[in-house]
Amino acid sequence: MEQRFVPALRRLRRLLEDASTELQITIRFALIGGLAVSTWGGIRATRDIDFLADSNPSPMGNRRLRDDLKRCLEEQRCRVEWRVGDPDDPIPLILRLRLRGGSIETGADILWAYKRWHQEALQRRLEVKAKRLRVFVLHPEDLILLKLDAGGPQDLLDVRALLASKPPDLDVERLKRTAARIRLRKLLDSCLKEVKR
């Protein structure tokens, strides 16, 4: 994991944990973007930090909770923006944060879980130690499924990199079963064929 992201990751973890305490809700979160790919052995450059998050209650349909979260984070000197998608949007809710640390500004996008298997994935998140920091990262199988579901060119490159790097805890047969259950098996098989697994 790149050293330059460590202070921002430490601050983000503290911000989300403090918001959980202040709002009396449990916010579960895990890395999902380029930093997660590199954590599991894929080679990936990135400019920002991406998380998957969930809470009960969820801000998905709860405007008041979105406003409370925004206020809570702005009090900690973050620039905060909720991006609410249209009903047919593939990503219905993102919390976008901008963190300043000295002369460096880091962006963080927090995709709010909107499918049951996203919530299940957050239950399986793993805590990884990186550069004297403990950070939650989506399990490699769940990260692959999330990337397959997104289906963009970079996402599919990330899937191939993850499959080729053979991260620990990756059970390909279990991954195939789960991919079939959520209708991603054909795309997974195509990626597996390309990396000859």
Image (cartoon, helix red, strand yellow):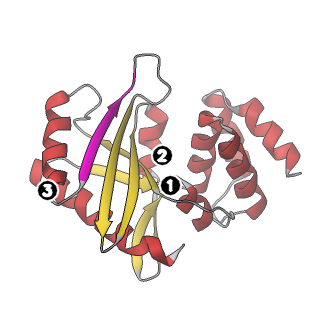
Q: Secondary structure at mark 1?
A: loop
| Residue occupied by mark 1 | 138
Tell me the CA gap for discs 1 and 2.
7 Å
| Residue occupied by mark 3 | 21
* Residue bounds of the magenta highlight: 79-85
Tell me the CA gap for discs 3 and 2.
22 Å
| Mark 1 vs 2: CB contact within 8 A | yes
Which amino acid does the dot numbered 1 rest on? Leu
Q: Secondary structure at mark 2?
A: helix
Q: Residue furthest front?
A: 103
Neighbour tally class for label 1: few under 14, some 14-19, many 20 plus, Cα within 10 Å: many
Asked if residue 129 shows in the view, the reply is no
Neighbour tally class for label 3: few under 14, some 14-19, many 20 plus, Cα within 10 Å: few
Q: Secondary structure at mark 3?
A: helix
Q: Position of residue 3 (x, y in %)?
A: 49, 78
| Residue occupied by mark 2 | 121
Neighbour tally class for label 2: few under 14, some 14-19, many 20 plus, Cα within 10 Å: many
Q: Is residue 173 left or right of residue 54?
A: right
Where is 3 relative to 37, above or below? below
The stretch drawn in magenta includes residue 81: yes
Quadrant in the rendering for residue 134: bottom left
Residue at horizontal 73 percent and vertical 62 percent from the top: 166
Q: Is residue 96 left or right of residue 116?
A: left
Which amino acid does the dot numbered 2 rest on? Ala
Residue at horizontal 51 percent and vertical 52 percent from the top: 32
Residue at horizontal 67 percent and vertical 67 percent from the top: 41
Q: Position of residue 2 (x, y in %)?
A: 53, 74
- Of callouts 3 and 1, the N-terminal one: 3
| Mark 3 vs 2: CB contact within 8 A | no
